[in-house]
Image (cartoon, rainbow, N blue to C red):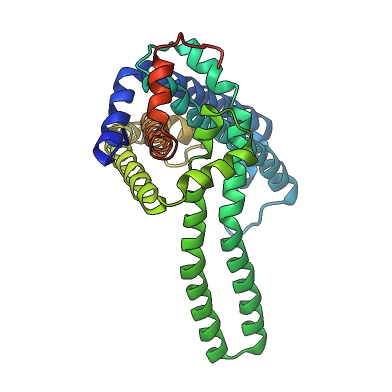
């Protein structure tokens, strides 16, 4: 039978409770591993550029940093940022594949293991990354066009040196964002079921986007409202979880800062802030696990609901529940 709002939210909580080992285990492995790699990359970048960093930080008042010192810092820490972005995208795609992979067993009442879910989700990560990138590009096109047009108009307004023209340009820019912003949201919701399609139906990115648009048709507002509610609930829970870790970090940093001299070195400052950074990272990791698991579970259940309503998926689920599980899928 079709799922209402309460059943979808309760189903997400129920799945989270029954399969938390798989969801949080994979999330912890993915994001914890990413943090470890980023920390190692940061340490390597710092050790390779520490002399340049000290010269930039210890500049006399009024002096400018030399390009010979700034360029290595930009390259080193820019590389760290690039590594972090790749790991974040991969980790997010892994969690967006994990939630539907868990739901495949949850909706059938089957037990699942960490290894089975990991293999099933990891096999679909490249396709999920493709859907995420394509969705982001498609949704961002209206905003990028608005930004380009706004910049061009601002250049013209500055060239004309007219206050009235500038005011008109600013008004047009604000109106453009108000018009095109909802278009971007509409496109995102239209393709929001694509990651679930990739896992459940093993579709490729472009086919998954088409399939998502087909399933969302006629239910855009419902999917938008329930998805937005899921993201808000996850954000609130993540914030509440991070608060005590932030306060703990502030306390430890205050204790560490009391031991600093009047002219501390960058290394001493980093060491004194180590407790704060550690506590904040732990809190953010736990909060990220909530943010990365609950909304995809809700969106996965919305996918199931749309197929129940449009394609009589309930009968197919009942038949599949009686069949032996296929662990390789």
| Residue 285 seen anywhere in this rendered image of the structure | no
Considering every residue shown, the one lying at the far top of the view is: 324
Pick the quarter of the image with the N terminus.
top left
Considering every residue shown, the one lying at the far right of the view is: 68
| Residue 26 seen anywhere in this rendered image of the structure | yes
Relative side of 158 to 301, left or right: right
Pick the quarter of the image with the C terminus.
top right
List x then y, in percent, for residue 56.
Answer: 62, 46
Q: Nearer the viewer, residue 158 or 69?
A: 158
Q: Nearer the viewer, residue 4 or 86?
A: 4
Question: Residue sitting at 33 percent across and 35 percent down?
Answer: 258
Relative side of 42 to 27, left or right: right
Q: Nearer the viewer, residue 30 or 45?
A: 30
| Count of number-bearing discs | 0
Q: Nearer the viewer, residue 313 or 275?
A: 313
Relative side of 253 to 144, left or right: left
288 vs 209: above or below: above
Question: Residue sitting at 64 percent across and 32 percent down?
Answer: 45
Q: Quadrant of residue 48?
A: top right
Question: Residue sitting at 57 percent across and 48 percent down?
Answer: 136
List x then y, in percent, for residue 187.
Answer: 52, 54
List x then y, in percent, for residue 25.
Answer: 42, 18
Relative side of 110 to 75, left or right: left
73 vs 219: above or below: above
List x then y, in percent, for residue 70.
Answer: 69, 47
Q: Quadrant of residue 141?
A: bottom right
């Amino acid at each position: 039978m079709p799922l209402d709002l309460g059943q979808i939210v309760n189903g997400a909580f129920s799945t989270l409770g029954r399969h938390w080992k798989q969801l949080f285990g994979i999330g912890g492995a993915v994001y914890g591993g990413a943090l470890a790699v980023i920390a190692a990359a940061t340490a390597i970048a710092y050790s390779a550029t520490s002399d340049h960093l000290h010269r930039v930080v210890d500049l006399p008042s009024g002096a400018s940093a030399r390009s010979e010192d700034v360029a290595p810092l930009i390259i080193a820490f820019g590389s760290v940022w690039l590594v972090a972005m790749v790991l974040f995208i991969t980790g997010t795609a892994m969690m967006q594949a994990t939630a539907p992979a868990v739901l495949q067993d949850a909706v059938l009442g089957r037990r699942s293991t960490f290894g089975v879910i990991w293999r099933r989700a990891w096999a679909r990560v490249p396709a999920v990354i493709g859907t995420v990138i394509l969705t982001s590009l498609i949704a961002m096109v209206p905003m990028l066009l608005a930004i380009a047009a706004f910049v061009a108009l601002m250049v013209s307004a500055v060239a004309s040196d007219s206050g009235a023209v500038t005011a008109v340009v600013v008004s047009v820019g604000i109106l453009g964002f108000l018009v095109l912003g909802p278009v971007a949201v509409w496109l995102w919701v239209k393709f929001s079921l694509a990651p679930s399609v990739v896992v459940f139906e093993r579709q490729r990115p472009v086919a998954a986007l088409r399939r998502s648009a087909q399933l969302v048709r006629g239910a855009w507002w419902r999917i938008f409202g329930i998805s937005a509610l899921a993201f808000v609930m996850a954000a609130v829970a993540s914030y509440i979880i991070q608060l005590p870790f932030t306060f703990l970090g502030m306390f430890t940093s205050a204790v560490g800062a009391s031991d600093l001299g009047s002219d501390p070195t960058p290394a001493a400052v980093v060491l004194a802030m180590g407790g704060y950074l550690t506590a904040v990272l732990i809190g953010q990791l736990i909060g990220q696990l909530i943010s990365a698991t609950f909304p995809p579970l809700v969106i996965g259940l919305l996918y199931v609901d749309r197929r129940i309503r449009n394609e009589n998926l309930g009968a197919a689920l009942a038949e599949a529940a009686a069949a032996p599980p296929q662990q390789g899928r």
